[in-house]
Amino acid sequence: MPPGGWQQPIPRASAFSAGFVLAGWGSRVGATMIDVLILALVSAVLIAPGVVVTFVTDIPGLGIALWLLGALVVTIVALLYASYFMQRDGARNGQTPGKQALGIRVAFPDGRRVDWGQALLRELVIKGLLLGVAGAIASVVTFFLFGLGFAIPYILDYLWPLWDEENRAVHDMIVNTRVIKS
């Protein structure tokens, strides 16, 4: 090729070129669906007593109180669910039950495993609070769509890996994690 001519750009090394294989979008979504199903079953078990008592007793407020207590426990369980499973020691580190079932896990670009603080930051602060606040704002903006805007930040977060070259969601970019095949 003559000097000054065009040539192929030098390929950029992936953060996981050292033996790690990035998980695909389908396995990420599948893992999320498994985790949502598990949480839905736990929610049903925890809220059911309040619903049943509401319809079979004449004690005013008892059913509602049990339902609210169940909802509070479900909220706490949901907020801590992924954080707990992500920080486990050993081979299951970085894996919720859904990720474990599909053979993927969360790790840092250098292969480091997720610890408790990082799991809380990723799952509770970013995915829970940050996306939740963004969803609340979107819900207000889309008031005439019956508040369906709440889902927009979550939808964008879960679709983002489709166009990111390292299959990262927004929450992965913020805390510098990747989802890889385990």
Image: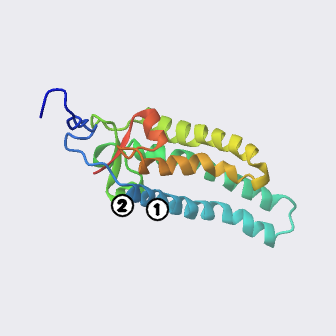
Q: Position of residue 67 (x, y in %)?
A: 73, 58
Q: Which residue is mark 2?
A: 101
Which residue is more in the foreground, 127 or 82?
127
What number is the disc on residue 34?
1
Could you say which quadrant of the image residue 136 lies in?
Answer: top right
Q: Would you say 107 lies left or right of 72 here?
A: left
The amino acid at mark 1 is Ile
The amino acid at mark 2 is Ala
Q: Residue at the location (34% across, 45% down)?
A: 93
Mark 2–mark 1 CB contact (< 8 Å): yes
Does the image show residue 46?
A: yes
Q: Residue reaching furthest top?
A: 4
Q: Residue at the location (75% across, 44% down)?
A: 140
Q: How is the image coloured?
A: rainbow
Q: Residue at the location (48% across, 38% down)?
A: 122
Does the image show residue 146?
A: no
